[in-house]
Image (spheres, rainbow, N blue to C red):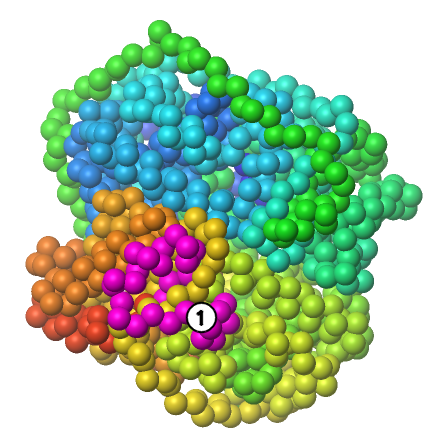
């Protein structure tokens, strides 16, 4: 659950927002729709439980809650602001309801639920939703599993049919082949995200030490490999029958819908599914430690880490809110004690706190990674001293509490920018509290947190209390741990399974033909956002659109000061300069600026990519002027302090060292260098290289800023509930910005590709291999060959149910995911196929990639695939312009490539008329294996012998891409 509950509490201060500038039309429609349902007769088979509407200045998520006779809870949230619907079905079961020895079942089952059901064929679930222009996924945590999809509103009936079929008609479609395939997929996921990732086993090891053996939080959600290996098909079926009944589920639907029709569909598709066994709420038992437990492990990391975890309460406990405030004071942002005592003075590259909560327990954690020359034992002393400092200074201040509450407010408002965000909040409240309208409870508990409360929980749960303290150190550096281990991992006790007589098959019933896929409704009308253009007195081009659904403003100011402006011997300079501009100014300390922004609930973030340095601003509109003032102060008056420079330079270097431990990052970067040449700065990581960063000086930063940070070639994109006139007036404050701008330098010639060559980078003991196959390709164009080639690739490697992913993931079980894509901008482009695969499948994975690419190039698409891409891409626009972030992306494309918004209509026309012959011709033109190189990062000892027969030319490289 983490801090999901915390964000929901953001409704607290929102009562002071008065009219949130949500357009009156939407409020009236939402009210009218809800009133219609309230005044009408409740459909047969349903019981109406509750209804909440928006009244005056009150801020709520309107909904009506029903219960179907079989126990299914249904929550409807009308929102006609965009022609789409979001469907979420949450089952109240996660890893916290698993038995010892059967870990990972909840997550494993999440995977199985996408493998078809009695009336839905294998892979058809993904196919139907993608073809409908929708997106889908599922997730599992300790306490719940949910499945969700966002689709054009005309696809709602089809979504309900899909979800109902796998709830009530799943088991007969389960086969041993599907079971084994998904078991391999889950193993690949564990390898990719846990075993093969730096620090990936941190929380699993801490959980083992923090909770008593057998406690369901003592294992990770993904589970242990040995438990997955031990599971059989019968175990899976029993898990389904125990937990996947309608009476343990909440169906939440939000968006553009006819509520009466929606309830009729829910009754039709879900009404014949019988109840499952009764489910009771998990019982909380206090977790305590009799002494500090020191544990450690050696890992493939560049920096050590110390992690301290205290058991506290549980989600929704009265003390959760003051503990969250304490967390912020100790370890959130530049105002925190951990930042001041470790990061600011250069002793750590990162230090923060968290308070993660679930139904059965919360953990208050403090984490730090030292800069070279500082030890974990020293950092532990500083962490403990920081706790003492909190108490000695009298605990929380009014300013501390104000900052935390402002963050809650803004977080909640941002969560209301999408229908999926609102639906997710309703579903979570219902699942954990049996009340979708639990906002009032959160309002009260966070608004009422006092300074005394924060000190009280500190003394009760943290002061002089015992914790698990974990050290993770680089391999071979076991002497660097914080303190000798005082606790050892136990040999797990696997109890005998207990048969549950209440679990039995319960076939569903139907009075209609469930094998018939519901027809789509009439396609919704989709219109790209209206845009306006402005130019400031200093030449900044502005592109904006109005988003009046929420009272927020998002701005991206782009300066042509990215990697392309760096000399090749000063790689990383653009990123380091951006970081420095985001620090102290000539007027204010970085901490003062951070304090101002946190109290506003705003963010201002500087970053650099290969072409631009961007200033990203996000704020509640009522705080726009104050937030913009902070951003302009940072932009125009950077202090460029030597101490800040040294600290940030070290952090950037250590970040690169950490990235080198990630095989996926290494594979992608080396592919770029091989394709575009190491003498082109953009081919390198944005942060540069260790060797170039070490040579940079503060003077380099100052000179780069002076040469590039000017307004004349900058542009600005804005999405706000404010109208054009108001935005124009507000942005006049940018007129104070002066400075120079530099021209785009000429690119160095791209190297001649050694097609057919394997470039291999050894990563000893890697459980997986990262594969990259590709070549240079087309630059971006909105309606030409680049756009059409992207359409061509969709069935090969663009969609989840593409040929490549179905082969490598679903059929072979080699990977957690595989794909291919074209990427292009205005000065370069490439085509790449890629995956992280199980080490022992490396050679055959390359064979499968080759087979799919060459077959697609030689034979082209099928008629069915052409229909699929036309349907999927053609309906996707319904969800392309919903949120400010999506609108910002749309405007960014227009600004970058000087487009008219009518390019969307032209693309739709191309999509409608494109032929099988044209796309197949593009496949033949661009998918020639003899033009491509292959990059593999993996364990040479495990995989090289199998690769040698496949390649005439093999070049071994170091992690920088230099030949050995």
* Nearer the observer, 381 or 494: 494
Q: Mark 1 points at which residue?
A: 957
**Relative vertical location of residue 204 with respect to residue 795 in this rendering, above or below:** above
Q: Residue at position x 75%, y 78% from top? A: 640
Q: Where is residue 293 in the image (x, y as percent from the top left)?
A: 72, 32
* Nearer the observer, 885 or 238: 238
Please state, as top left, top right, bottom left or bottom right, where the N terminus lies in the image: top right
Q: Residue at position x 43%, y 90% from top? A: 748
Task: Left or right? Give the position of 653 relative to 755.
Answer: right
Q: Quadrant of residue 709?
A: bottom right
Give yes or no for residue 941 being in the magenta stretch. Answer: yes
**Relative vertical location of residue 372 with respect to residue 230 in this rendering, above or below:** below
Residue placed furthest toward the right: 392
Q: In which quarter of the image is residue 855?
A: bottom left
Q: Quadrant of residue 561?
A: bottom right
> Does residue 598 appear in the picture of this structure?
no
* Nearer the observer, 590 or 354: 354
Task: Left or right? Give the position of 830 relative to 393.
Answer: left
**Relative vertical location of residue 542 with respect to residue 852 in this rendering, above or below:** below
Q: Residue at position x 73%, y 25% from top? A: 289
Q: Give the range drawn in magenta.
A: 935-964
Q: Which class describes the residues within 10 Å of circle 1: few (<14), some (14-19), or many (20+)?
A: some
Disc 1 secondary structure class: strand
């Amino acid at each position: 659950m983490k801090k999901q509950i915390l964000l929901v509490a953001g409704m607290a201060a929102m009562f002071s927002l008065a009219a949130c500038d949500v357009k009156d039309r939407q409020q009236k429609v939402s009210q009218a729709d809800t009133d219609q349902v309230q005044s009408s007769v409740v459909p047969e088979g349903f019981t109406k439980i509750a209804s909440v509407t928006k009244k005056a200045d009150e801020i709520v998520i309107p909904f009506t809650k029903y219960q179907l006779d079989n126990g299914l809870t249904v929550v409807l949230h009308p929102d006609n602001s965009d022609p789409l619907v979001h469907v979420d079905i949450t089952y109240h079961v996660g890893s916290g309801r698993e038995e010892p020895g059967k870990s990972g079942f909840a997550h494993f089952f999440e995977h199985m639920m996408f493998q078809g059901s009695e009336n839905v064929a294998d892979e058809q679930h993904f196919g139907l939703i993608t073809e409908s222009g929708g997106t889908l996924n599922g997730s599992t945590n300790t306490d719940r599993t949910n499945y969700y999809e966002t689709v054009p509103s005309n696809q709602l009936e089809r979504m309900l049919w899909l979800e109902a079929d796998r709830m009530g008609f799943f088991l007969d479609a389960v086969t041993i082949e599907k079971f084994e395939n998904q078991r391999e997929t889950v193993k690949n996921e564990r390898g990719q995200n846990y075993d093969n990732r730096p620090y990936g086993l941190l929380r699993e090891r801490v959980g083992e030490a923090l909770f008593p053996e057998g406690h369901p939080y003592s294992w990770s959600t993904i589970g242990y490999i040995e438990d997955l290996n031990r599971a059989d098909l019968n175990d899976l079926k029993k898990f389904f029958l125990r937990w996947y009944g309608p009476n343990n589920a909440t169906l939440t639907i939000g968006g553009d819908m006819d509520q009466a029709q929606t309830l009729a569909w829910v009754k039709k598709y879900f009404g014949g599914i019988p109840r499952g066994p009764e489910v009771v709420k998990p019982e909380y038992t206090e977790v305590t430690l009799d002494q500090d437990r020191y544990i450690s492990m050696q890992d493939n990391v560049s920096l050590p880490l110390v992690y301290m975890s205290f058991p506290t309460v549980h989600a929704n406990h009265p003390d959760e809110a003051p503990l969250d405030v304490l967390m912020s004071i100790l370890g959130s942002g530049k105002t925190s004690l951990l930042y001041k005592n470790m990061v600011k003075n250069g002793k750590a590259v990162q230090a923060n706190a968290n308070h993660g909560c679930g139904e059965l327990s919360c953990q208050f954690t403090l984490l730090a990674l030292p800069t070279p020359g500082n030890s974990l034992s020293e950092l532990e002393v500083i962490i403990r001293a920081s706790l003492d400092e909190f108490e000695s200074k009298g605990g929380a201040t009014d300013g501390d509490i104000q900052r935390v509450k402002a963050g809650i407010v803004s977080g909640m408002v941002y969560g209301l920018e999408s229908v999926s965000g609102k639906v997710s909040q309703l579903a979570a409240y219902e699942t954990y509290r049996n009340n979708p309208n639990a906002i009032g409870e959160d309002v009260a508990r966070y608004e009422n947190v006092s300074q005394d409360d924060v000190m009280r929980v500190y003394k009760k749960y943290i002061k002089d209390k015992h914790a698990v303290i974990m050290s993770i150190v680089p391999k071979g550096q076991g002497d660097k741990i914080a303190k000798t281990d005082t606790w050892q991992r136990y040999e797990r006790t696997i109890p005998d399974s207990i048969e549950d007589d209440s679990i039995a098959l319960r076939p569903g019933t139907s009075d209609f033909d469930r094998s018939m896929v519901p027809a789509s409704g009439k396609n919704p009308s989709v219109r790209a956002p209206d845009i306006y253009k402005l130019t400031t007195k200093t030449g900044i081009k502005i592109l904006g659109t109005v988003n009046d659904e929420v009272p927020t403003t998002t701005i991206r100011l782009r300066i042509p000061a990215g990697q392309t402006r760096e000399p090749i011997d000063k790689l990383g300079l653009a990123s380091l300069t951006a970081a420095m501009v985001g620090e102290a100014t000539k007027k204010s300390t970085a901490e003062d600026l951070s304090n101002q922004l946190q109290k506003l609930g705003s963010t201002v973030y500087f970053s650099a990519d290969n072409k631009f340095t961007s200033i990203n601003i996000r704020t509640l509109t009522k705080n726009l002027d104050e937030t913009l003032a902070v951003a302009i102060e940072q932009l125009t008056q950077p202090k460029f302090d030597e101490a800040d420079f040294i600290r940030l330079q070290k952090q950037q270097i250590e970040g690169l060292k950490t990235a080198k431990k990630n095989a996926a990052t290494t594979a992608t970067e080396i592919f770029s260098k091989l394709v575009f040449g190491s003498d082109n700065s953009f081919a390198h990581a944005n942060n540069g290289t260790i060797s170039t960063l070490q040579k940079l000086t503060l003077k380099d930063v100052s000179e780069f800023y002076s040469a590039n940070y000017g307004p004349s070639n900058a542009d600005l994109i804005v999405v706000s509930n404010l109208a054009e006139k108001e935005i124009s007036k507000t942005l006049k404050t940018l007129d104070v910005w002066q400075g120079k701008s530099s021209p785009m330098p000429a690119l160095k010639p791209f190297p001649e590709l050694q097609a057919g060559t394997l470039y291999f980078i050894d990563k000893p003991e890697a459980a997986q291999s990262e594969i990259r196959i590709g070549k240079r390709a087309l630059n971006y164009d909105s309606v030409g060959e680049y756009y059409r080639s992207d359409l061509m690739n969709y069935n090969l490697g663009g969609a989840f149910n593409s040929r490549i992913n179905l082969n490598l993931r679903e059929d072979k079980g080699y990977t957690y995911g595989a794909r291919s894509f074209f990427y292009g901008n205005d000065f370069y482009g490439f085509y790449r196929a890629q995956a992280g695969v199980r080490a022992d499948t490396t050679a055959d994975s390359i064979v499968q990639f080759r087979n799919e690419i060459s077959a697609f190039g030689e034979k082209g698409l099928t008629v069915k695939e052409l229909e699929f891409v036309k349907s999927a891409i053609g309906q996707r626009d319904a969800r392309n312009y919903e949120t400010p972030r999506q609108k910002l992306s749309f405007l960014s494309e227009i600004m970058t490539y000087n487009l008219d918004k009518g390019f969307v209509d032209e693309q739709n026309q191309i999509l409608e008329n494109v032929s099988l012959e044209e796309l197949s011709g593009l496949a033949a033109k661009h998918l020639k294996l003899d033009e491509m190189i292959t990059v593999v990062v993996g364990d040479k000892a495990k995989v090289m012998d199998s690769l040698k027969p496949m390649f005439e030319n093999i070049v071994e490289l170091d992690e920088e891409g230099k030949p050995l």
